[in-house]
Image (cartoon, rainbow, N blue to C red):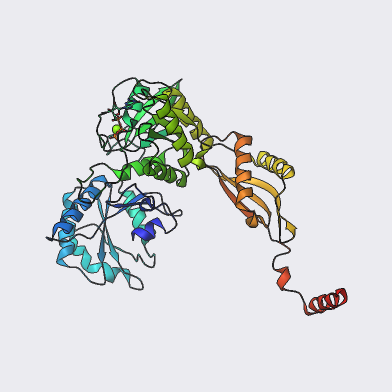
């Protein structure tokens, strides 16, 4: 069910080395409503050390979730273990949706009938392997969630203006940055990883413009399974990234760019989020330490040339407004409106300056462009055999669009669309007469 919900190609957090290991987190796949999904191990009564650890993991997943999905095996039928799990989930006080799996090809009502006995709300018939009922399940679950950008169950203020989420490894200074921007000690900071447990929304006004800053729990992987279990919410951090208009990724200058930093940035980009980078704790570093850091930075993140980078001290406040302004600009770029006429004009100029390569003895023609989406900008380029355009030329196009529209800080997605191509397949479908003629020509040419 987790694979079905998150899709195979989508941002599975587990695919990013170093980010999480305890529980499996993922974003729902493109055409499903947006949500963060957590997979847990199976729950059973009693058991050994491993089962106990698994139990603890499930409890953490329950703690960070807004709504629980209890999945039962409809072909195996209702068992005592199911009653045990239902009781456990009910005790959490969180809303529970009951999904009866393996329902493919069955009459739903009869299939789920016995599961009414669990005393949960109406059971839903689903098939994870076939995909039946999966969207309905997600919709039912989301209906029970407290609205994300709303006051209420979460006890958090409603989001106002662009949302800027601050993310990074534990202890890099995320909460300190927000406190310094606010000029007050709103958030708890401590020299200890895992200080922030949940995503916290904080209203922030600058030059008369309202923003919402989101402090998040630092993500990191434990070294060993047996280490003390982290009690912070990975899901809320992921959700904050997903909902943000731009993300400030904080790095710790004293620790260099780690694999986890690169993974986190990869995740932000894959979600299509705009970002700016804050290299924190720049204070009190020697020149050679600073040079060493920047060398490592250029080496580890060469693909990040479109994001602005600021060396800051959250503790002293140096450069933090510049960092914030970068993120605000990136948020704006992420939502930029790109008129078709302008896009097409830029495309024309770019193509004239440096025409696309020949492919199979035909020149690829790119005729016009329009905007297919925002946050991040999606630019759809129409042409002939456009899908054969090499990656290097795609990158060139993206860079030129970026420059022409001043789209700093946001990823840009490019989609190439081909109108009906009159030459398609022609090589292989010569008529008999054409083939004959070609053969004769060859003979004469010899
Ligand atoms: N020297 C120096 N120390 C800093 C700076 N920013 C934060 N710190 C210190 O780093 C420690 C961690 O800061 P926090 O703001 O709690 O870090 P965090 O990223 O919110 O950490 P978690 O909530 O645990 O993920 C604190 O002791 C801060 O005083 C900085 O710019 N320079
Ligand atoms: Mg914190």
Q: Residue at x 59, y 51 (%)?
A: 415
Count every numbered label the image shows and give the total.
0
Quarter of the picture holding the C terminus: bottom right
Question: Where is residue 355 drawn, in percent x and y?
Answer: 72, 48
Q: Is residue 211 visible?
A: no
Image: 145 above or below 336: below
Q: For residue 423, which quarter of the picture?
A: bottom right
Q: Nearer the viewer, residue 124 or 1?
A: 1
Question: Where is residue 141 drawn, in percent x and y?
Answer: 32, 52
| Left or right: 123, with 409 as reference point | left
Image: 421 above or below 200: below
Question: Where is residue 357 drawn, in percent x and y?
Answer: 70, 53
Question: Where is residue 177 drawn, in percent x and y?
Answer: 35, 27
| Left or right: 164, with 340 as reference point | left
Image: 131 above or below 181: below
| Left or right: 368, with 237 as reference point | right
| Left or right: 67, with 297 as reference point | left
Q: Nearer the viewer, residue 59 or 230?
A: 230
- Residue closest to the far right: 444
Q: Regarding ligand 2, which quadrant of the image does it lie in? A: top left
Q: Residue at x 24, y 33 (%)?
A: 192
Q: Is residue 396 visible?
A: yes
- Residue closest to the far front: 288
Q: Nearer the viewer, residue 342 or 135?
A: 342
Quarter of the picture holding the N terminus: bottom left
């Amino acid at each position: 069910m987790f694979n079905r919900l998150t899709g195979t190609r989508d941002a599975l957090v587990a695919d990013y080395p170093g980010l999480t290991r305890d529980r499996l987190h993922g974003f729902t796949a493109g055409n499903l409503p947006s949500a963060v999904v957590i997979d847990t191990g199976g729950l059973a009564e009693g058991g050994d050390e491993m089962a106990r650890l698994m139990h603890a993991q499930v409890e953490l997943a329950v703690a960070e979730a807004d709504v629980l999905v209890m999945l039962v095996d409809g072909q195996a039928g209702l068992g005592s273990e199911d009653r045990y799990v239902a009781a456990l989930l009910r005790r959490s006080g969180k809303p529970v949706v009951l999904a009866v799996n393996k329902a493919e090809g069955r009459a739903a009502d009869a299939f789920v009938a016995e599961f009414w006995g669990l005393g949960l709300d109406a059971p839903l018939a689903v098939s994870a392997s076939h995909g039946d009922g999966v969207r309905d399940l997600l919709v039912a679950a989301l209906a029970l969630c407290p609205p994300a950008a709303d006051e209420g169950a979460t006890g958090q203020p409603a989001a106002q203006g662009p949302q800027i989420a601050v993310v990074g490894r534990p202890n890099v200074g995320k909460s300190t940055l927000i406190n310094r921007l606010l000029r007050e000690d709103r958030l708890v900071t401590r020299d200890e990883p895992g200080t922030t447990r949940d995503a916290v929304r904080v209203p922030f006004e600058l030059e008369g413009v309202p923003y919402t800053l989101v402090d998040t729990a630092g993500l990191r992987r434990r070294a060993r399974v047996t280490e003390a279990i982290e009690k912070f919410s990975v899901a809320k951090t992921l959700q904050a990234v997903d909902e943000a208009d731009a993300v400030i990724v904080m790095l710790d200058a004293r620790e260099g760019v780690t694999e986890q930093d690169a993974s986190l940035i990869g995740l932000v980009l894959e979600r299509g989020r705009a970002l700016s980078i804050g290299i924190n704790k720049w204070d009190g570093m020697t020149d050679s330490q600073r040079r060493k850091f920047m060398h490592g930075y250029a080496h580890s993140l060469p693909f990040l040339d479109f994001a602005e980078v600021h060396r800051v001290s959250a503790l002293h406040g140096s450069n933090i407004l510049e960092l914030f302004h970068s993120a605000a600009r990136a948020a704006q770029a992420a939502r930029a409106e790109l008129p078709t006429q302008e896009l097409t004009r830029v495309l024309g100029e770019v193509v004239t300056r440096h025409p696309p390569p020949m492919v199979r003895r035909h020149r690829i023609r790119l005729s016009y462009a329009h905007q297919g989406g925002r946050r991040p900008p999606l630019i759809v380029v129409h042409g002939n055999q456009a899908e054969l355009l090499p990656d290097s030329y795609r990158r060139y196009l993206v860079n030129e669009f970026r420059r022409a529209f001043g789209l700093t800080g946001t990823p840009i997605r490019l989609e190439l669309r081909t109108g009906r191509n009159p030459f398609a397949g022609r090589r292989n479908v010569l008529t008999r007469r054409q083939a004959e003629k070609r053969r004769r020509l060859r003979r004469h040419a010899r």
